[in-house]
Each structure stands twice: as structure tokens, then as C-alpha cells.
Image (cartoon, coloured by chain):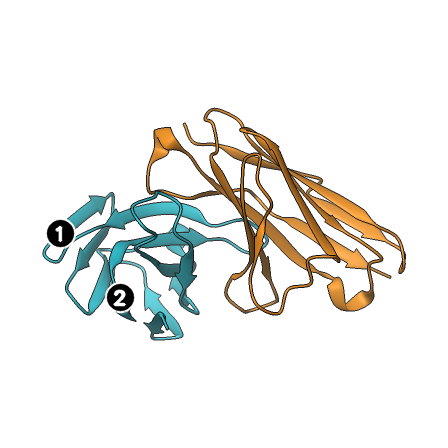
Chain colours: A cyan, B orange
């Protein structure tokens, strides 16, 4: 059974204090690891998809990396507006189709203080 | 691009009534749509997967007669909560994936359902 574990559950940072969020996974036939950001009362906002170990993607202050067992979301010099819940999800190989379901982690609640 | 909308954004209904939630892909054709529910301070729980023109596939433990899903077109899926009860109160979120946004799932803004 697919498993996704995110750590820490909550992270409090000072503005400008860089850090990383972790997503550990076990899945047979990974067909993508996804990072989303979710603000309270809203749907998740797509950030990144990573497909193979060694892959990295960046967007503004965020950088996502992937190994065979885990992914990291690095946040460089965060600002208060980066405060949100960050969700990690994996998609299992679904027979070559594009709609394999996602298994989500519990999320990391990030709070950035000014 | 890849915008998904939901309607309504929130709804209050009385126990025993039915409620329909719409999910639309605004700028792409959604081959597959997913319905999730999320309880406070918890992660997303997949309820069902629907492919256009086919019956939905429900996750274990989800009552298919209570949560009716219809995916009649490539841009619209609906979730109907039948005979709603207070325990059905939750945040319902849809997502969509299509042939022209291969591999990514884009989420709608969610619908807050409160059953009184």
C-alpha cells in the first residue's frame, strides 16, 4: 500500500530563515511526486511535479528535489505570505494512463513570522 | 491555464435533503475528475474517480448510493450528496486531469457543506 509521510507536522520560521520540508514515500511504480500549497478554506494549489530521482524544480523561493525514497521542499528566505500547509502526494503507475490516483501526506503547516 | 471551478463555494442544507456540487474545468478538457473530502486539520481523502462517460470508481468505505457522481462531459462533473446528515458536513474538493495537462491534477477551490 502506498504511504506518504511528511515531516515536520508544523514548522515555525522567522522571515528570512531558510528551511526544508520532508516527504518520505513508499510506492510501487512511482508515476510522479507532487507538491501542493493549501491556504485555509481553499483548494490545493499546484506547485511542482517530479518524476525521477535527481530531478529538481524551482519556483521563486521554493525548490523541490527528489530521491528514490523522499522529496524535499526547500524554502529560501521565506516571507510571511509563504505561510500555508504544504502537501506532498504520490501517484502510482496506473497502467500507462494519466489518471492514477494521488495518495497524500498529512501536510506540513508552515508559519513564517515577520 | 488549468483552472478548475466549483459551485457553490459554500452551502447549508437541512438534514435529509440532497445537495449538488458542480466541478468545471474552465480551460481544458478533463478526461478524469476526482472528488475529495477534507475534515478540519486533516489531509485530503479521495472519495471517487470519474472518467467522462463512465461510472465513477469509489474508494473503499465510500457509499456510492449516498455520494452520486456524474461526469457527463469533458468539462463538468457533479457530486450529489443524497439524504445529507450532519456527519456529511465537510469540505469537498474536486480535481481534474486531462489529456492536455498530462500527469498534473488541478484542484478546485472547494465547497464547504454544512448540514443542520
Q: In which quarter of the image is residue B71?
A: top right
Q: Note whether residue A18 is visible.
A: no
Q: Nearer the viewer, residue B5 or B85?
A: B85
Q: What element carries label 2?
A: loop
Q: Mark 2 points at which residue?
A: A28
Residue A58 in the image: above or below residue B42 = above
Residue at image position (36%, 33%) is B101
Q: Note whether residue A10 is visible.
A: yes
Q: How far apart are marks 2 and 1 (CA)?
A: 19 Å
Residue A98 at x, y percent in the picture: 35, 42
Looking at the image, residue A17 sits to the left or right of residue B115; the answer is left
Residue B58 at x, y percent in the picture: 58, 58
Q: Which of B54 and A90 is in front in this view?
A: B54
Residue at image position (28%, 70%) is A25
Q: In which quarter of the image is residue B55?
A: top right
Residue B84 in the image: above or below residue A7 = above
Residue B103 at x, y percent in the picture: 33, 42
The residue carrying pointer 2 sits among few (fewer than 14), some (14 to 19) or many (20 or more) residues within 10 Å by Cα, namely: few
Q: What element carries label 1?
A: loop
Residue A54 in the image: above or below residue A7 = above
Residue furthest toward the top? Answer: B27
Residue at image position (52%, 35%) is B4
Q: Name the residue under label 1.
A: A55
The residue carrying pointer 1 sits among few (fewer than 14), some (14 to 19) or many (20 or more) residues within 10 Å by Cα, namely: few
Amino acid at each position: 500500500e502506498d504511504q506518504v509521510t511528511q515531516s515536520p507536522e508544523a514548522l515555525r520560521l522567522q522571515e528570512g530563515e531558510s528551511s526544508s520540508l520532508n516527504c518520505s514515500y513508499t510506492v510501487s511504480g512511482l508515476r510522479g511526486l507532487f507538491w501542493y500549497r493549501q491556504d485555509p478554506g481553499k483548494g490545493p494549489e499546484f506547485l511542482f511535479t517530479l518524476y525521477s530521482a535527481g530531478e529538481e524544480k524551482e519556483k521563486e523561493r521554493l525548490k523541490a528535489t527528489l530521491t528514490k525514497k523522499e522529496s524535499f521542499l526547500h524554502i529560501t528566505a521565506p516571507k510571511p505570505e509563504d505561510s500555508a500547509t504544504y502537501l506532498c502526494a504520490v501517484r502510482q503507475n496506473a497502467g500507462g494512463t494519466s489518471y492514477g490516483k494521488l495518495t497524500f501526506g498529512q501536510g506540513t503547516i508552515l508559519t513564517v513570522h515577520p | 491555464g488549468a483552472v478548475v471551478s466549483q459551485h457553490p463555494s459554500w452551502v447549508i442544507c437541512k438534514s435529509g435533503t440532497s445537495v449538488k456540487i458542480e466541478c468545471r474545468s474552465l480551460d481544458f478538457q478533463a478526461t478524469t475528475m476526482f472528488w475529495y473530502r477534507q475534515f478540519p486539520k486533516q489531509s485530503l481523502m479521495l472519495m471517487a474517480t470519474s472518467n467522462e462517460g463512465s461510472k465513477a470508481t469509489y474508494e473503499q468505505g465510500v457509499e456510492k448510493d449516498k455520494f452520486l457522481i456524474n461526469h457527463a462531459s469533458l468539462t463538468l462533473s457533479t457530486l450529489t450528496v443524497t439524504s445529507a446528515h450532519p456527519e456529511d458536513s465537510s469540505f469537498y474538493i474536486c480535481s481534474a486531469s486531462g489529456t492536455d495537462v498530462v500527469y498534473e491534477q488541478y484542484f478546485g477551490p472547494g465547497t464547504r457543506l454544512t448540514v443542520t
